[in-house]
Amino acid sequence: MITESFAEAVREAEKVIEGAEFIAGEQDLVEGYDYLAGSIRGSLQLAWAYERDFPYFVASTGPYTKMGLDNPDTLYFHSYLRPDAEYVVTGTRGTTRDLSFQILDGDYSPVDVPDSLTAFDDREFEIAPDGSYEIRFGPGKAGPNYFTLGPGSAMLVVREVYSDWAREQRGTIRIRRADRAGQAPPPLARDTLEKRYGVAGKILLSRLKTFLAFPKWFYLDLPVNTMTEPRSTPGGLSTQFSSVGHYDLDDDQAMIITVPKSDAPYQGIQLGSMWYVSLDYLNHQTSLTADQAHTDPDGKIRFVVSERDPGVTNWLERTGHRRGILQIRWQRLSRDLKPDDGPEVEIVPVSEVAARLPYDQTITREEFANRIAARQAAVATRMLG
């Protein structure tokens, strides 16, 4: 059977899910099976996109194919490359807060993170008055709108980042190999499809094992219910800092996270599960950007992480996850962040949240429901196309 290698990988992947050491009950396992389903969809999509001569951008992750603590504010795309070929990327710059490009020398593995060979944002190339642009990647020397592919270059990753989900508009982007315009790839053969099913199985197992290891690498050795000082984000993003941590809260406890509103164009916080993916950001407020959050008169944003509704605007819903991941990101920075740019954390009873907040951010249930409706509409709109 042509699909046998992939079917065997799915069976092994199910064992990986069932063997996750943090599973504490049926709900954790059910969530893991759902994560597996998204990973199966994503792996097949990525395997069929492994085309370096007639490349195209594919969504690396999304609301239904989550991986790698996906940022709810980001659209992720990638395409595969040959280091000795030249590629033309054309597009139009939308009104989103950040647009960045990164060249990796391979893929993530359970023991390693790929090296970032090049990383930059759209401030590094010319954009026409109508928002259109053309940039090239190849083995030649870097120059205006030309970026050199170093030895081992294998993947181009593009991130488009929102801060105001309702008002900002995504751009467009496409890629082609410079010397293949007007040509066509060879017809599919049976052995090509067989290889792709095999590649899909390898991608599936690799992504599951890799990203289940990430919390151990970067989060779980930190003291629980704390967050780090801002630091340059691992992985080579050129203008991103992050503060990370993990929480473990009873249902009657709340975590108040206080952080200055930054002068960075993008600042956002999110919660993630122990599966190292974002919590449901479509139907719950499990993330907030600086534009979405309430900022107090002293210039600080105070988030409240809890299971029970504390009745405040900046409530981050745990959605039944007693344990989870915390991350704040700052992007498109023009300066390094200092410790006093970062968060302070306090654990309090939910019943005392209002008394502990220095400024009022009371919200009614109806008003909060309207915020959720706006999230649902915004995500549905931006995921089209």
Image (cartoon, rainbow, N blue to C red):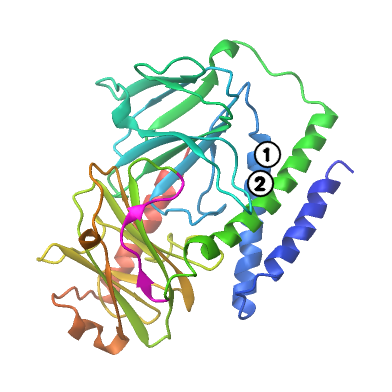
Q: Which numbered disc covers residue 209?
A: none
> From this viewpoint, is residue 222 visible?
yes
Residue placed furthest toward the left: 297
Q: Is 202 inside the magenta-drawn segment?
A: no
Residue placed at 59% from the left, 49% from the top? 112
In the rendered image, residue 302, in percent from the top left (x then y), is placed at 23, 69
Q: Which numbered disc covers residue 47?
A: 1
Q: Is residue 149 above or below residue 69?
A: above
User: As shown in the figure, which amino acid type bears the numbered disc 2?
Assistant: Ser
Contact between labelled residues 1 and 2, with CB atoms less than 8 Å apart: yes
Q: Nearer the viewer, residue 87 or 40?
A: 87
Q: Is residue 148 above or below residue 320?
A: above
In the rendered image, residue 231, in percent from the top left (x then y), is placed at 34, 55
Magenta span: 224-235
Q: Is residue 70 left or right of residue 227?
A: right
The residues bearing labels 2 and 1 have C-alpha atoms spaced at a distance of 6 Å
Q: How busy is the neighbourhood of tag 1: few (under 14 within 10 Å), some, or many (20 plus)?
A: many
Dot 2 falls on a residue whose secondary structure is helix
In the rendered image, residue 125, in percent from the top left (x then y), is placed at 32, 24
Judging by the rendered image, the residue that carries numbered circle 2 is 43
Q: Is residue 261 left or right of residue 205?
A: left
> From this viewpoint, is residue 169 visible?
no
